[in-house]
Image (cartoon, rainbow, N blue to C red):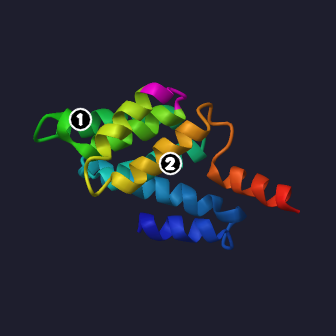
């Protein structure tokens, strides 16, 4: 359900440019993580939604819950390392984020997303813009 809400929100045609759908998706991801805190794909999407909503301060409690739910050493969980890296990136802690993302990139499930995040950090360590903004700048300079 949360994934569906994110897709509807991305289209932006239903309510306030998708704002209500993003809030609904956030709610569903929070409920999912209350029952299954080690669902790292959902955790990474929740971190994105919390950042988008300006509520990134809520994310560490979900990271902590995931660490507590780990059946093995948390430093061996690539999904958790990826989520930590994403959170650290948006908290403007680029060096720590790269360390976490670098560890996560060794896992085939997180390799691509980790590398994309690391490239974005290298291109823009202060988070002023993302790859979308860089593409828009390149388009205007061609004309």
Q: Is residue 11 left or right of residue 16?
A: left
Image location of residue 104, percent across then percent down: 30, 43
Image location of residue 26, percent across then percent down: 48, 53
67 vs 22: above or below: above
Residue at the spot 44% in from the left edge and 66% down from the top edge: 3
Disc 1 residue crowd, few under 14, some 14–19, many 20+, Cα 10 Å = some
- Name the foreground residue: 44 vs 25: 44
Asked if residue 99 can be seen in this view, the reply is: yes
Disc 2 residue crowd, few under 14, some 14–19, many 20+, Cα 10 Å = many
Residue at the spot 58% in from the left edge and 32% down from the top edge: 125
Quadrant in which the C terminus is drawn: bottom right
- Name the foreground residue: 124 vs 19: 124
132 vs 63: above or below: below
Mark 1 vs 2, N-terminal side: 2
Q: Is residue 135 left or right of residue 114?
A: right
The tag on residue 48 is 2
128 vs 4: above or below: above
Q: Which element type, helix, strand or loop, lies under badge 2?
A: helix
Residue at the spot 32% in from the left edge and 47% down from the top edge: 105
115 vs 7: above or below: above
**In terms of secondary structure, what is the magenta stretch mainly?**
loop
Q: Magenta residues, as a range? A: 91-95
Asked if residue 37 can be seen in this view, the reply is: no
Q: Does residue 92 show up magenta in the picture?
A: yes
Q: Does residue 16 show up magenta in the picture?
A: no
Quadrant in which the N terminus is drawn: bottom left
Query: Residue beneath label 1, please?
Result: 67
Q: Is residue 127 left or right of residue 59?
A: right
């Amino acid at each position: 359900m949360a994934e569906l809400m994110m897709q509807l929100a991305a289209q932006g045609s239903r309510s306030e440019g998708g704002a209500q759908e993003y809030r609904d998706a956030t709610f569903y991801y929070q409920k999912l993580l209350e029952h299954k805190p080690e669902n790292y794909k959902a955790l990474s999407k929740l971190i994105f939604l919390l950042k988008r909503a300006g509520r990134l301060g809520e994310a560490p409690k979900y990271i902590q819950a995931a660490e507590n739910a780990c059946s093995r050493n948390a430093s061996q969980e690539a999904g958790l390392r990826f989520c930590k890296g994403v959170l650290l990136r948006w908290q403007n802690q680029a060096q720590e984020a790269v360390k976490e993302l670098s560890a996560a990139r060794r896992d085939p499930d997180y390799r691509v997303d980790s590398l994309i995040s690391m490239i974005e950090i290298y291109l823009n360590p202060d988070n002023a813009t993302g790859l979308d903004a860089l593409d828009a700048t390149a388009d205007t300079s061609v004309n």
